[in-house]
Structures are given as structure tokens and as C-alpha cells.
Image: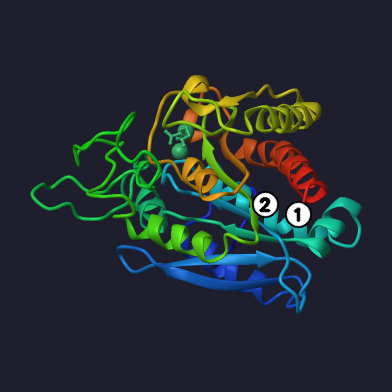
Amino acid sequence: PRTHSYTKYNSFDKVQSWIHSMASSNADLISKQTIGNSYEGRPMTLLKLGKKSSSVKPAIFMDCGIHAREWISPAFCQWFVKEALSTYGSDSQMTSLLNEMDVYVLPVLNVDGYDYTHKSNRMWRKTRSRNSGTSCIGADPNRNFDAGWCTVGASNNPCSDTYCGSRAESEIEAKNVADFIRRNKSVIKAYLTVHSYSQLLLFPYAYTFELAATHSELMKVAEGASAALRSLYGTRYTSGPAAATIYPAAGGSDDWAYDLGVKYSYTFELRDTGRYGFLLPESQIKPTCEETMLAVKYIAAYVQKNL
Ligand SMILES: NCCCCC[C@@H](C[SeH])C(=O)O
Ligand SMILES: [Zn+2]
Ligand SMILES: [Zn+2]
């Protein structure tokens, strides 16, 4: 049967059926909405976690699977949803968080690419959009946002894995996310985007070496989150502004959200540091998700305290 598992890398179809079953599991705490379709017509289904309320609540937005081959990322978003729903009512912090805030979770942003890595090319990164004038397919959705678009750390060659696209938000998947965040920017207080690998907790900017206006606060929170993560299994993360900590890279979703006014904007690079890389064994899904929960909850608690 189409069995979904939190400790396996689930196919797109399994994730989709899981999303629907979660959304119908607890109408008081979770609902779903499709924020648009992908290039190949797959739905981009967003889960909204949080105690149902007639008034608008401040929110956190988290996306996973923007890069197709980074399978541990969607696995974490699924884990987060399970943890949130199963510990609401028993874990005081999660209960407080979901009472006071909403948490939007997009389990798989790059749905076409994710499906393609399961069926064709495990190492695919980009979207699956057709580029004119070449047989090379797709653009890097994390170079496609309107943030210093294509100025640094991106390529204008459609055959490159960091192709920035024909224009900012040329990729419908990036546009669907940007549209949703724009529509809700008055309530979205934090943006988290989950990638792998390298064990890094990055924050703006990647499109410039200039420090963000709130650099010291972003750094303080990142260091606290990394320490929380490390407390479980000793996994070591490096925190810092992306340009200097990993590499300069324009067009990123985190830089774009930060410049839109989302004060707390972070990119996670989950396990490992290169031994398995994108091919992280399923045996590491559970420990990776457990430790990452601590970091995400740390950030969420900080955001909630500073509403
Ligand atoms: N906004 C860019 C943050 C730094 C780069 C993150 C990595 C994740 Se695979 C990348 O998009 O190359
Ligand atoms: Zn990535
Ligand atoms: Zn990465």
C-alpha cells in the first residue's frame, strides 16, 4: 500500500497523500491550501498549523525541498508537522506557539524536481521548466528570487545548475511562494528555508558581503539555535551571514524575504558535511530531524517572545 513513513524518503505521491490525511486529521489545528501549481502542473500544497482563530495571528513560514535532490529537507518538514500536532497539548512551548502563532509549512516547494529525482535523476537540483533555445532544463529556484537577481554566484547559462532563470520569479514555483509571502507579509514574522548539506545556519545576505541591518541579532539567534541543535547529539553547525559563511549567491529566497521586511530569515543546510552529502542514509532521518526540531523551536520561541 501507499505507506508513508517519517523515517523514509517519501515519493511526491506519498507526500501528497500524507498532506491530505494530515489536513483532515485535526481541523482545529491544521488546514491546507494550494498556493499554485508547478510548471508541470503539480499542486504546491501549503499546510497551516495553529489553533484555529477568528482573528489574524502572526506567522512563521517554512519551506522545504526547494532543491530537488536535498531529500532530508522535505523529510524534516514532514517531521515538523508530525511533532507539532503530536506534542500540542503536552509540550508547553509547542502549545504556546500554536496558540499564539500560525506556522505555514510547504513540505515540497520544487515538486517537479523532487518527483524527477525519485524517477529519473537523483542528483537533479533545479526546476523542470523548459528553456527556449536550448535542450537544457530548469532554473535554480534559489537564484530566482528578486534579490540582487543574477548579480553574483549565479549563472545566466540555462545548462548551469545555478541558472538564475530568464528573469526574477520566472520560475512559477518561486513566484507562487513570493506571491503568498507578499500577500501575507504583514503577519509573517519569520522565514525559514531548509536545504542540505553542510550543517550551516545561514542568514542574509548572500547577494552582498554587506552586513544586514540586524546582523548582530540574527547572529545571536543563530548561535542559540545551533547550540540547541548541538545539545542533542553533538552535531556541529556553523552560523553566519551566507556570503562569507558559504559563498556569495544572489537571488535567494531568504535575502528576498529579509528585504521584504521579514526580520528573521534563515537558511538551514542540514546534515551531513560531505560523507554522504545529498544521499544521507534513511537511518539518519530521525536523528537529523530530532536535532533540527530543537533549532527551529529555539528560533520560533525567540520570534514569539519578540512579537
Ligand atoms: N540565499 C542563499 C543562501 C546560501 C546558499 C544556500 C545554498 C543551499 Se543548497 C544554495 O542555494 O546554493
Ligand atoms: Zn539547496
Ligand atoms: Zn545546500
Residue at (57, 64) in percent of width and height: 184
Q: Is residue 205 left or right of residue 6?
A: left
Q: Nearer the viewer, residue 206 or 109?
A: 206
Residue type, label 2: Trp
Residue type, label 1: Glu
Please state the horizontal and vertical placement of residue 85, each as a whole percent of the image. Answer: 77, 62
Please state the horizontal and vertical placement of residue 44, each as a whole percent of the image. Answer: 46, 65
Quadrant assignment, res 248: top left
Q: Is residue 230 left or right of residue 129?
A: right
Q: Which SS class for mark 2?
A: helix
Residue at (75, 23) in percent of width and height: 234
Classify 83 as above or below 31: above
- Residue marked by disc 2: 79
- Residue marked by disc 1: 83
Please state the horizontal and vertical placement of residue 122, each as a whole percent of the image. Answer: 37, 42
Tags 2 and 1 touching, CB below 8 Å: yes
Residue at (39, 47) in percent of width and height: 145
Q: Residue furthest front?
A: 213
Please state the horizontal and vertical placement of residue 295, each as a whole percent of the image. Answer: 72, 38
